[in-house]
Image (tube, helix red, strand yellow):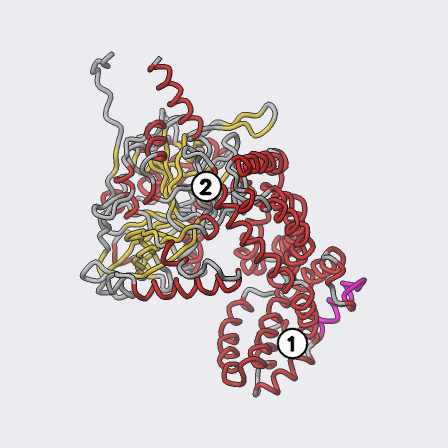
Amino acid sequence: MKFLKLFLLLFVVQFHAQQGGMWVPSLLKGMNENEMKALGSKLTAEQIYSINKSSLKDAVPQFDGGCTAEMISSKGLLLTNHHCGYDNIQSHSTVEHDYLADGFWAYKMEDELPNPGVVVTFIVSIDDVTTTILAGTESLSEADKQKKIQQNIAEISKTYKKEAWQDILVRTFFDGNQYLLFVTENFKDVRLVGAPPSSIGKFGSDTDNWVWPRHTGDFSLFRVYADKNNRPAEYSKDNVPYTPKHFFPVSAKGVKENDFTMVLGYPGRTTEYLPSYAVEQIAYDLNPARIEVRDAALKVQDGFMRKDQAIKIQYASKYASIANAWKKWIGERKGLIKSNAVGVKQKFEKDLSDKIVKAGKQAEYGNLLSDFAKNYAEIKDYAIARDYYSEVVLRHTEILNFGYRLFQLEQVYTARGEQAFNDRKKNLIEGFEPLYKDFNAQVDEKVFEKLIDIYSKKSPQQFLPESLKGINATQVSADIFKSSKLTSYNGLKELLTGDAKTVIEKLNQDKGFAFVKMIAEAYNKNVAPKYDEINLRNIATQRTYMKAILELSPKSARIFPDANSTLRVTYGKVKGYKPSDAVVYTPFTYLDGVMEKYVPGDYEFDVPKKLIDLYNAKDYGKYADNGKMPVAFIATNHTTGGNSGSPALDAEGNLIGLNFDRVWEGTMSDVYYSPDICRNIMVDSRYILFIIDKFAGAKNLIDEMKIIYNQPKTSKKVKK
Ligand code: ARG
Ligand code: ASP
């Protein structure tokens, strides 16, 4: 009987542990710790996060705001993704030294390359400050409440006890129901150490992006430098390699299906607790609108990039970033529909309503769902208009984006006068220079034509300026691009020459500027105020909804806060999946698969000669798995954008992989995580070691790491 109970408990825990979740590292004791143990982890919560001793979290900084990284040596060696270091690798590249194409390796520390502006942020401690932040907000209106919260955050950021070289960060959790304070250390001397060529680090490029099976060696190496006291410092050649409080041993032992894995990192944003009405809007209204606009922009850019090498370079990075979200939204929409996420949410809402009645909480929570229903119905057209506006005007038609910044400049003058105008103008002129470097008027004219056509026909008509309805987009775009000064950097500087009055007069005579201004003014009048008003109501409703969920769910419920760019722990198992009828994916890929995809000279699927030679000779050093070279693997860890570069750890806390993506069928995990098909994708640490060692010959880096190899097999009897 006792046995059966234990078995059931284990079964329940195991089952639940496959459900995803991004957990706060300082709050793992209890349920999470038990689940992790049941899955095979040997680590205690204290080993993952401790304020008194060094712990795993000390090896996991945020990399430059948007990615994650990990320390893999006592001398500040840092591992992250190739796509996270991409801009830096690019910035050191010239035609003679093209590190994107050929890779880069520092065989001595003196050869490492500084990257001004890059910041690596470590978490020192985490503290719950909810009471302080919410003090004095109880009876305020929603808008005043937000203001008061901001004041309280500013106040505690000034008064909280910390060392002089540390910083404070306060973030909300559970939609405003909890506030946590982070003491951080920001390191600013970060040097490039190594990067494989893009034909390894970006192998498969946009075609393979978000897709399993995957064969990308998506990694790069940096080194964190500190001052003589091991503290953060601006770049100086006198700085020394940083000694982290913890670094990860790198495992060359490999993983098997069903092995425990854990990922620590900085997931950016998820919305797992949206009501069914919101999910329905994402799947059926908002994603389709965004996809449609990006689809058109990408087609135009691609057409030019294929024909013109210079344009290909100019638009490569822009194209990749437009395509990344575009592809994700398509997958997300499909996944939400296929998994009936709306139905799942409706069932959850029904259960919650029952609990509200049972607990006698109708007075506090009884109207939540009807409020949501009303709010989301009301906001729908405004939200669609907002997405079209932001995709068309603020993002993908560059001349409109440039014009919009100038429209803001005009508003600065009206609101704050000549001095503010001049300051902003100076910043703009500097800021525009790199933008125009990667701008091609011919491409943009075509993008403009396609996107304005979509905007005039598809954005909710009731909010559009009259003069935009039924326009001939081809004619309008030709007309504007013929005369507007916004089509070149020199033209722009000409427009901005003179005092405020002169500049504003010139701007308003420019057809490009006048066109943006017309659209922006209509949006600011017809959409923004109402959207903001309904959205503010939704924020308040969402907070109360979250409070109800927290309050009325059983103690055992697995409720985790949405991602908010703070450090989280997610765990699960190495596991394949079944993407569709009759198809099953296994969880590992090998170098053989790279060679299967190989297309000589191709932009996405070329393979470096050296790698082919190593493959043909099966020269895999100590990193092979039964004679094959592992490349990537998948697991049930719940990750999102921002988790790129995150360490994947085994049951002992050794590095087994480097997170860089998710599978296509599971990209909906930002809104609804399903253990059946949501998988994160990692580069196998053995592939990373193999590339550094055998491909690049960077023995200096291999020597500096602590590598864990398989014990040679002995004939020791296994105890029964
Ligand atoms: N999809 C991954 C993430 O969201 C990787 C993106 C970089 N790779 C690429 N081919 N664009 O960021
Ligand atoms: N590729 C993403 C990143 O860059 C990770 C993901 O969305 O799964 O953070």
Disc 1 is placed on an element classified as helix
Task: Point out residue 325 in the picture as x, y percentages from the top left corner.
Answer: 56, 49
What segment carries the magenta color? 468-482
Q: Quadrant of residue 613?
A: top left
Q: Residue at x 61, y 77 (%)?
A: 491
Crowd around label 1: few <14 · some 14–19 · many ≥20 (10 Å): many
Q: Nearer the viewer, residue 660 or 59?
A: 59
Closest to the observer, 430 or 687: 430
- Mark 1 highlights which residue? 485
Frontmost of labels 2 and 1 is 2
Quadrant containing the C terminus is top left
Most extreme residue toward the left, as rendered?
229
Residue 669 seen from this side: yes
Q: Which residue is mark 2?
A: 551
Q: Kindly indicate the quadrant of the structure image that contains residue 136.
A: bottom left
Where is residue 327? Give x, y as percent.
58, 45
Observer-nearest residue: 400 or 601?
A: 400
Secondary structure at numbered mark 2: helix
Whether label 1 lies within 8 Å of ligand 1 gets the answer no
Q: Describe residue 678's horizontal placement relative to residue 475 as left or right.
A: left
Mark 2 / mark 1, whichever is N-terminal = 1
Residue placed at 71% from the left, 61% from the top?
452
- Relative placement, left or right, of 61 versus 305 is left
Three-letter residue code for mark 1: Lys
270 sits left or right of 684 in the view: right
